[in-house]
Image: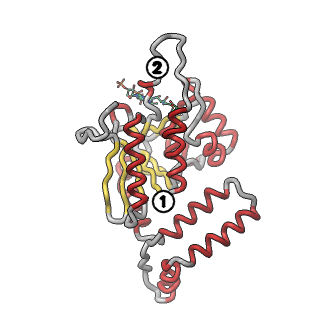
């Protein structure tokens, strides 16, 4: 296993900007496929970002020509023909906690898909709140190509975002689709020209860094929970979350700024 403290070759790069952080998946020679050190480093980076009260948004992207090729398959080849490599452990230990953490984080997560997003890499992108992609990027539910099923939330995200017919086609045929197709099918927010990806991602994060953070976190919670709630349950949830939002000083700042015809100056208090 690579040393987590290998400063010359860290699997995750983190950078702080004013009001947000950037996490870069950094195994470009493997198209940023996940191994254990990368999972552990990403977990630490997410926990640090959440603990930092000044951090009001997160940007996830990949180094090199790919976004993420999912699980690193070099550790998945059995030694002998006929021998099985039984999976499930890495989902329990890493992928599932990762997706749960991303969805529950009280700040918006922006994903800048800079290149191919395959397997778990595609579904980690779909778990983010705002997904933008370079025009040259592709999305591929590569699992069926090797006899697996979409994980990291894929079987949950795909039908909800793209509908059942497209979810089945994507999962079972495992063909790559273009970023433009992903946008047209509602899998992602927006496609931008390759050269503009970084600027667009920074612009969105800068906007979130000035936004009423508490309210955004509550929007995220309401939308997450709507997937399994009845309308009645959702109306009750909206009442409760609205009450919570209104108790944050940023709500009053928003109303005051409206009447004073000026830009609000939100504290971002969570
Ligand atoms: O515990 C568990 O295992 C369960 C969890 C499962 C989660 C999963 O994500 S399972 C799905 C795993 N991912 C895949 O099956 C995708 C495999 N990769 C590909 O199909 C292709 O590489 C891509 C479609 C992503 C990109 O194709 P292309 O032609 O642009 O690039 P390439 O030449 O295939 O890859 C470039 C290099 O990256 C190459 O290495 P080389 O030959 O230059 O030394 C390739 O082997 C390496 N690479 C790409 N993906 C992976 C990888 N190495 C290890 N693991 C990978 N997933």
CA distance separating discs 2 and 1: 37 Å
- Percent x, y for residue 109? 47, 56
Q: Name the quadrant where ligand 1 sits.
A: top left
Q: Is 235 drawn above or below residue 169 in the view shown?
A: below
Q: Secondary structure at mark 2?
A: loop
**Label 1: which secondary element:** loop
x then y, percent, for residue 265? 41, 79
Q: Which residue is mark 2?
A: 77
Q: Is residue 95 left or right of residue 74?
A: right
Per the image, the residue denoted by label 1 is: 108
Residue 184 on image: x %, y %:
58, 48
Quarter in which the N terminus is drawn: top left
How many residues crowd mark 1 within 10 Å: few (<14), some (14–19), many (20+)?
Answer: many
Name above or below for residue 102 compared with residue 77: below
Q: Nearer the viewer, residue 209 or 259?
A: 209
Determine whether 55 is above or below 76 in the image. below
| Label 2 crowd bin: few (<14), some (14–19), many (20+), radius 10 Å | few
Left or right of residue 8, residue 189 in this image: right
Residue lying at 32% horizontally and 47% vertically, measured from the top left: 13
Name the residue rendered at 32%, 61% in the picture: 17
Observer-side mark, 2 or 1, equals 2
Q: Quadrant of residue 147?
A: top right
Residue 25 is at least partly visible in this image: yes
Farthest top residue in view:
81
Residue 141 drawn at (x, y percent):
55, 34
Q: Which mark is residue 19?
A: none
């Amino acid at each position: 296993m690579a040393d987590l403290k290998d400063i010359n070759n860290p699997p995750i790069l983190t950078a702080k900007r004013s009001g947000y952080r950037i996490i870069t998946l950094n195994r470009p020679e493997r198209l940023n496929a996940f191994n254990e050190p990368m999972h552990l480093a990403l977990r630490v980076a997410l926990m640090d970002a959440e603990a930092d009260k000044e951090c009001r948004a997160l940007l996830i992207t990949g180094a090199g020509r790919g976004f993420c090729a999912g699980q690193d398959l070099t550790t998945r080849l059995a030694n002998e023909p006929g021998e099985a490599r039984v999976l499930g452990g890495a989902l329990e230990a890493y992928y599932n906690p990762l997706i749960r953490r991303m969805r529950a984080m009280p700040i918006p997560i922006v994903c800048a898909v800079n290149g191919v997003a395959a397997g778990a890499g595609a579904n980690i992108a779909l778990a983010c709140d705002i997904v933008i992609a370079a025009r040259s990027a592709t999305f591929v539910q590569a699992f069926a190509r090797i006899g697996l099923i979409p994980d990291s939330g894929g079987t949950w995200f795909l039908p909800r975002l793209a509908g059942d017919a497209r979810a089945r086609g994507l999962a079972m045929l495992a063909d790559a689709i273009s970023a433009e197709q992903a946008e047209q099918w509602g899998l992602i927010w927006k496609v931008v020209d390759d050269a503009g990806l970084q600027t667009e991602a920074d612009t969105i994060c800068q906007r979130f860094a000035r936004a009423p953070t508490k309210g955004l976190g509550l929007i995220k919670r309401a939308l997450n929970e709507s997937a399994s709630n009845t309308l009645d349950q959702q109306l009750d949830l909206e009442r409760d979350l609205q009450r919570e939002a209104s108790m944050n000083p940023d709500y009053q700042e928003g109303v005051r700024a409206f009447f004073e015809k000026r830009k609000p100056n939100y504290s971002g208090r969570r």
